[in-house]
Image: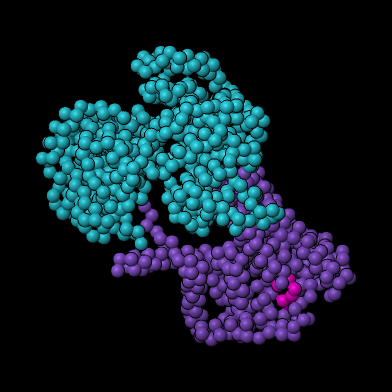
Chain colours: A cyan, B purple
Amino acid sequence: MTEAKPEQASAQRLERAAASPLAIELIAINKHFGPVHANRDINLAVRRGTVHGIVGENGAGKSTLMSILYGFYTADSGEIRVDGNTAHITDSRHALRLGIGMVHQHFMLVENFTVLENVVLGAENSALLRPTLRKAREAMKRLAADYGLEVDPDAVIEDLSVGQQQRVEILKALYRGADILILDEPTGVLTPSEADHLFRILRTLRDEGKTIILITHKLREIMAITDEVSVMRQGAMVQTLQTAETSPAEIAELMVGRRVLLQVNKAPATPGRVLLEVENLVVTDDFGIPRVKRVSFSIRAGEIVGIAGVAGNGQSELLEAISGMRDQTLGTVKLNGQPLSLQGDDGAARAREAGLAHVPEDRLRMGLVTNFFEWENSVLGYQDKYGGGLGLDRSGARKQAAERIRKYDIRPANPDLKTANFSGGNQQKIVLAREMERNPDVLIVGQPTRGVDIGAIEFIHNQIVAMRDAGKAILLVSVELDEIRSLSDRILVLFDGQIVGQADPLTADEGQLGLLMAGVHEGEEHPPGPGTLPDHVNPIERSLTKLGPKQDSIT
Amino acid sequence: MSARVPLPRWVDVALLPLLNLVLAFLIGGLIVLMVGQNPLEAVGIMLYGAFGYGSGFGYTLFYTTDFIFAGLAVSLAYHAGLFNIGAEGQAYVAGLGVILIALALNGNPWFVTLPAMIVAGGLFGAFWAYIPGVLQAKRGSHIVITTILFNFIATSMMGYIITRVLKPAGVNSDESAPIDALSRVPQLRVFWSLFRNSPVNLTLFLALIALVFSYWLIWHTKFGYAVRALGHNPTAARYAGISNARMITVVMAIAGALAGMIAVNNVGGVQGRLILNFVNGAGFVGIAVAFMGRAHPFGVALSALLFGALYQGGQELAFSMPGITREMIVTIQALVILFTGAMGDMLRLPLERLFARRQSARVGG
């Protein structure tokens, strides 16, 4: 977490900003949803020409507040002032007329339209398309020159990368005359380098006088780009801080309401015998395209192996194949030296039987049946272990669920509640409790803390380390490089379905890992970063020669 | 950002179906008014016809028996995420199993033939549902399409078998040879004179057993757990090691066996022979029964009784009010199906808004 910009420059700009008028002022905003008090007496002042961060855990009320500002909801009480004038924002068109634009977390783009068509969509001010498009093309050129927002206006959306699509969303807002941009969790879908690019754009926008409100739960982003940060907790505004004068630890404490450890405390690993062995694994996706290409690795008892990589480079398919969720085309998976038979649509049952537990990447799609009661989900996958004969031992399962709820501090502490009513962090705890309490030999964990609050992240990380210390082999996949680095004892980098490098998390250089994740090969156009050690280069080169492009035709 | 608040449970399971029903009867009443008849009088006749005297009540229970089986056949499959439109054909084909075993054991007392008919009817019905199940599980052919097509195949095939194979020489009507009276399923009037000449028979108790069995199966067994996991989230079911393909075929087979009991009720209990098209739409009514009963056995029992009463009371009405034709009865029945089945959720959103507002008013005030 390095502070890149010089303190002085930022202080100067803040002084200027302090003098500048308020772009947005929210006074005593209240909003109820049924019995839920989503926003209580919120006061917020956003200065013109600044990047203002809003942080808080899931359900803290950030999105509700921004939706009120954007006209999606109406507040029960309170006042909104835009540029000093009181405004009753009725809908998003009204918000846009006031110069407020929003970039949603999930893009609102027409996939098979061009960039230009998407930019003008809903803002065509003539019955004929041609003059509008001509005007928009001019405007886009200007915006590209002013803010570094380069996107080919004639490219079709579905051909663009996620980062570029996000730029189109920003362009859409600016084309409509937005002066104040709200970005909701903008980096959730971006690779690290795309996120850097986004931040460059945001800085330019700010320097050109635009006001930016950034909703996020990632503290490093707050530190990297915002000028001021407002912390929300349980529907209330806790405090607004000058970013330069605060620390991630302070923000985290304000968010959660107690002191949180941002680092994982763990002793060095003491690896034992090999528990999981993957040899020459080839896995194809639903369309028959190979996604995992002859991957081999092994994990020892008492060791966490982290797989780093940009999402979509075969991690999901790798996890699914090892856990019996997806048929493998080639290769073997051995557990405790015994080959696992994973083919067929009940392979997961045999993997579990052999002692492999799986915390899936997407708990809602795979790991939970949200319509089930909590206790029903706490036996999912192990349902045959409850009760002899045909009957399901409901009371036994419920009793055990109640115990786990206590042990893992799952809230609300009620096993008879529908799982959909639990928050993301608590749902993840339900999955973790189920998979860990079965005492497996091998634990496969995908995205353990995706959409999970900071307080729960600490708990989950500690549980994973405790499993390791109990002598389990753990395979960890996460798109959060920080998480991989802090939890793993060994890092494998997956790119295009191949392991392109291995690193020691204690010595690995982030830039180096980033290059590997981006598929940039050693010694090509990029010179090795300053932290690169020769003994890292060797395994990379070795694996590169082993896994050349010749191997693509394996199926 | 969903501001939708789920309805209180009592509204979901009781008030909403009731409102749907009231709506259907209101519009049905308007139609009766339009043809110049008195709707209140019509309702009175229907109620009396369905529940007012022994024979009428017996007929109501006889129809109810059919609808319980059909409703369960649809409900069980629905819990696995499968839409079984094929109860009609499954019951029809089950009739073949029932008549074959009954004729083979003809002359034996009913307590020998009834279990045999249950098994044979169940097996034949299960087979007719098993094939679409396999096609769905292994080939991905959509169960809705295949079960509909299998209804047509059943009609043609059974028509051929009845008229060309089972029809005894020298008989004019299209039907199989009859089962001896002592080998048929005994009718309840033998035990209770209350039911007079109505066809309700011992199969009614089989239906009640099937209701309890279904409840136990769905909510109290590992199998039912797997069924519901599959129905709610097939990916999570696979994650849990539940073979989707195996579950689909087994669930369809059980659903088909349940539908097959309709044949025991009709072929074994009433007609005593296999006649053309004896199912007479009961399989399709089962879809409405299942939806109105929210696929819960208790709800299925209640809605089956409602539809049984509608059928019996409707026939009574057509008989006693000459101004109301059979077509009009079918219209009213269709309205009930429309409002409780197809448009069953029409009032959900307004109700949700209403209750959300009440709730927030309580919190705010």
Give whichever of A99, A404 is nearer the camera.
A404
Using residue A17 as the reference point, say whether residue A520 is left or right of it. right
Residue B295 percent across, percent down from the top left: 58, 63
Q: Which residue is pictured at 48% across the width and 66% down the height?
A: B9
Does the image show residue A98? no
Residue B36 percent across, percent down from the top left: 50, 84
What span is in magenta? B199-204
Quick check: B179 above or below A234? below
- Classify residue A294 by image quadrant: top right
Label tally: 0
Does the image show residue A106? yes
- Classify residue B292 by image quadrant: bottom right
Task: Name the magenta segment's main secondary structure.
Answer: loop
Q: Which residue is pictured at 79% across the width and 75% down the height?
A: B186
Say if the magenta span includes residue B203. Answer: yes
Q: Which residue is pictured at 22% across the width and 27% down the height?
A: A5
Residue B231 percent across, percent down from the top left: 57, 53
Q: Which residue is pictured at 75% across the width and 73% down the height?
A: B202
Give whichever of B282, A257 is nearer the camera.
A257
> Dividing the image into 4 quarters, which one contains the C terminus of chain B?
bottom left
Say if the magenta span includes residue A147. Answer: no
Q: Residue furthest front?
A: A267
Quick check: B146 above or below B292? above
